[in-house]
Amino acid sequence: MILLDGYKVANERNLELKKKIDEHKKIGDRIPELAIILIGNNPASISYVTGKGKACELVGIKHTLHRLDETISQKEVEKLIFDLNENPEVDGILLQLPIPKHLDDSYLIDLISKDKDADGFHVINQGYLYQKKKTIYPATPKGIMTLLKTYDIQIAGANAVVIGRSNIVGFPVARLLMDAGATITVCHRQTKDLASHTLQADIIIASAGQPELLTKDMVKQGAVVVDVGVNRVNGKLVGDVHFDGVKEVAGYLSPVPRGVGPMTINGLLENTYELYLDHLGK
Ligand code: NAD
């Protein structure tokens, strides 16, 4: 089994990005900037935002954290988003999910300018993606595709099974795999007999958010398995794949942690840089 080492690939790509940003600094361009909005005190969200901030520092992207109280009103968040949309120094805006239930996440995401949509969640950018037009891709699907490409995984002609159909992972990654030539099956909560699908798969993307859902008996010999899941079980991070079992049959397997997570952050940084280049007109 070959490990799909997202940590290593992301670090290499982040270094490349740092070199590009250093070049901009040398010629006097302004520094790229990502605004991060964090609402409330969800410990997982705080940890994700901290990780994203550190990664920004590493590559030379300025990041500003807008920490808002759990009880903030929808109007106040809207006002912040409008201000950030108008601010010429800000290239990317990220609203860390989940947000408190009294706020409308889908509405707020679509208020972010599509030209500052660092996460690639805006309805217009998703529309462009589904029409195969150039756009900002959601960071996790982008990171997964980059990981597969880096390991020269044959996608054209492959049978790919995506477990999960969310707007931020399952559905867009299925679309990108299809565009790259794979035949796609998207499984979800209502899917009957998940194993009957996964056993046919050359590529499996496990993004259900269910600890160790995919077991050895559900995987074809030599299959490529990407584990997107991040689940906390008894204080430990666990993926959607039973790693120790599946590693005996898979040809390639991504670990949790150090697999898709760092690739997602790299996707976010690369998106911010792309938006920055657009804003500079380069
Ligand atoms: P979600 O809850 O929005 O979607 C989960 C999807 O999985 C749904 O479509 C649901 O129908 C499907 N599903 C649930 N249980 C299933 C089952 N038993 N069989 C088949 N399908 C099932 O979640 P999401 O936002 O798409 O995230 C999925 C997982 O990926 C979560 O664990 C999340 O934490 C993780 N995630 C990781 C990263 C990363 O950077 N590593 C980024 C985003 C999400």
Image (cartoon, rainbow, N blue to C red):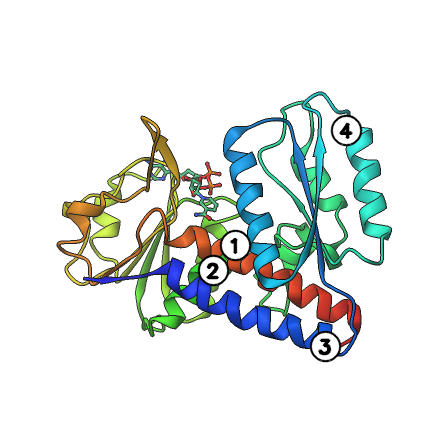
Mark 3: C-beta under 8 Å from nearest atom of ligand 1? no
The residue indicated by pointer 2 is 143
Q: How far apart are marks 2 and 4 (CA)?
A: 31 Å
Mark 1: C-beta under 8 Å from nearest atom of ligand 1? yes
Q: Nearer the viewer, mark 4 or mark 3?
A: 3
Look at the numbered discs 1 and 4 and tell me whether their residues touch, using CB distance below 8 Å: no
Q: How far apart are marks 3 and 2 (CA)?
A: 28 Å
Apparent side of residue 174 relative to residue 83 in the rendered image (left or right): left
Q: Residue 74 carries which label?
A: 4
Question: Few, some or many C-alpha atoms within 10 Å of disc 1 (few <14, some 14-19, many ≥20)?
Answer: many
Q: Nearer the viewer, mark 3 or mark 1?
A: 3
Quadrant that contains the N terminus: bottom left
Q: 21 or 244: nearer the eye?
A: 21
Question: Under tag 4, what secondary structure?
Answer: helix
Q: Is residue 72 above or below residue 266?
A: above
Q: Distance between the residues labelled 3 and 1?
A: 25 Å
Q: Nearer the viewer, mark 1 or mark 2?
A: 1
The residue indicated by pointer 3 is 26
x then y, percent, for residue 245? 15, 46
Is residue 175 visible in the rendered structure shown here?
A: no
Q: Which mark is residue 265?
A: 1
Residue at 37%, 66% (x, y): give it: 148
Corner quadrant of residue 117: bottom right
Residue type at mark 4 is Gln
